Image (cartoon, coloured by chain):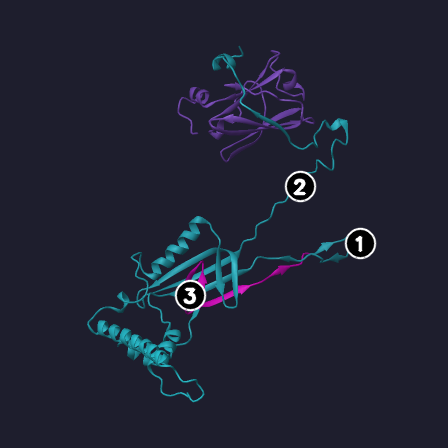
Amino acid sequence: MRRLGNLGTETVQRHTVLFEDDELIVHLRFFPTIQRWTIGAEFRGRRVHNKSLAVGVLHIREYNLPFDFYCTDNSGNGLDPFQLTDFADGRCSLYLLEPDDMRDIRGVEVPL
Amino acid sequence: MGVRDYLAQKSGSERLERTGIAGFTTYADINRSWEYSSESPTTYLEDGSSVEDHVVLNPVTLSIEGVVADIFESPEPLTQQVQSLTSNIGGINSYLPSRTQSQAQRVQSVINQANQSTSQLDSLIDSGVSPLNITGDQSSAGNLQEKFIDKMESLHKSKQTCSIDMPYRTFNNMRINSVSFTKDNQNDVLTFNMTATEIRVAEQASSDISNLLSDPSAALNGQTEGETDKGTQEGEPVNQSLLSVFLGG
């Protein structure tokens, strides 16, 4: 499991994460009118679009991908990320779950 | 009947049209039709009058009724070529330049070759070899009718479009909506009825508006910004059990 850094205050962000000898493109987007962060990912030709980020849950379980995203509220209040500065200030953290973590969760091998 | 006798016949059958369907060329006695149509919907205005200022083109539809058999006649090109070589009953040669010795020999060798080939075919036919084993498609993948059904079935299951050649026109991006087969065992032919519709696909276009609307208002909080590339990272390894993370530890 890895924590993604360099999450600034830009409303539309694109991060390239080195993952499994390949590139995982992560799209982060903030919607101020509904006060919500969304996440999308591209990996080896498969794409996930705009999943709303919430604390304490896995976001892309149904896609059967070898990774997932997990968000925590470091303030202990259990609030989902809803401000533009949540990640930059460190109130929320975003984690990338790797194939080993997915194997522990699902109990079976994950397709790479 | 040998090949030579057949070639000597004047072809009395009516001219057979060639139709290409998805690359499969059938010599078929066919009934074919295609239709262009358009609509001009009525739009009512505020004063009660109406205008019909939109013209909407409907996709082209076509239907083909054809026959696929296993043996097709293509007499004209072959007849003309072979007959011109073997049955020259006369010609006006006075205005032609006289042939050299080597030219005359070459012409004679071509004529001899054609004669030899037709003689060989005749001898094979006389000895009982079926003509089907000599000419035509020698692949072992089934006869022509079965190949045609295979082709139509694969187009149907793969949901692919194809090109269909019609007289005077070739239609691309055609989707065969329905095709029905009737096997006539008396005449050993396969009759088919087919309808096809043109497929038209919308072309998506998008443009980046961030240059036009860059931060028009602070209250928008950057919603009209373009995508910011935050670069490449590996992420920071976390030495923490997953269970503790899930339990909020």
Residue on which disc 1 sits: B47
| Prevalent SS, magenta region | strand
In the image, which residues are magenta? B18-41
Which mark identifies residue B77?
none
**Side of A111 where A72 appears, left or right:** right
Q: Give the Cα distance between marks 3 and 1.
A: 54 Å
Which residue is at the front of the view, B213 or B48?
Answer: B213
C-alpha gap between disc 3 and disc 2: 48 Å
Q: Earlier in the sequence, mark 3 or mark 2?
A: 3
Work out whether B112 lies above or below B32: below
Closer mark to the observer between disc 2 and disc 1 = 2
> Chain A, which colour?
purple
Q: Type of residue at label 1?
A: Asp
Element on which disc 3 rests: strand
Identity of the residue furthest to the right in this view: B47
Amino acid carrying label 3: it is Gly
Residue on which the image places disc 2: B207
Q: Which residue is mark 3?
A: B66
Q: Is residue B26 magenta?
A: yes
Which chain contains the residue that carries disc 1? B
Q: Is the C-beta separation of discs 3 and 1 under 8 Å? A: no
Instruction: Identify the image quadrant of residue A40.
Output: top right
- Does A33 sit left or right of A110 as displayed? right
SS class of the residue under badge 1?
loop
- What hue does chain B carry in this figure? cyan
Give above or below for A4 relative to B164: above
Q: Which amino acid, mark 2? A: Ser
Q: Going 22% across and 69% down the picture, which residue do you hit? A: B129
Which chain letter goes with mark 2?
B
Instruction: Identify the residue shown where x is 60% and y is 13%.
Output: A74
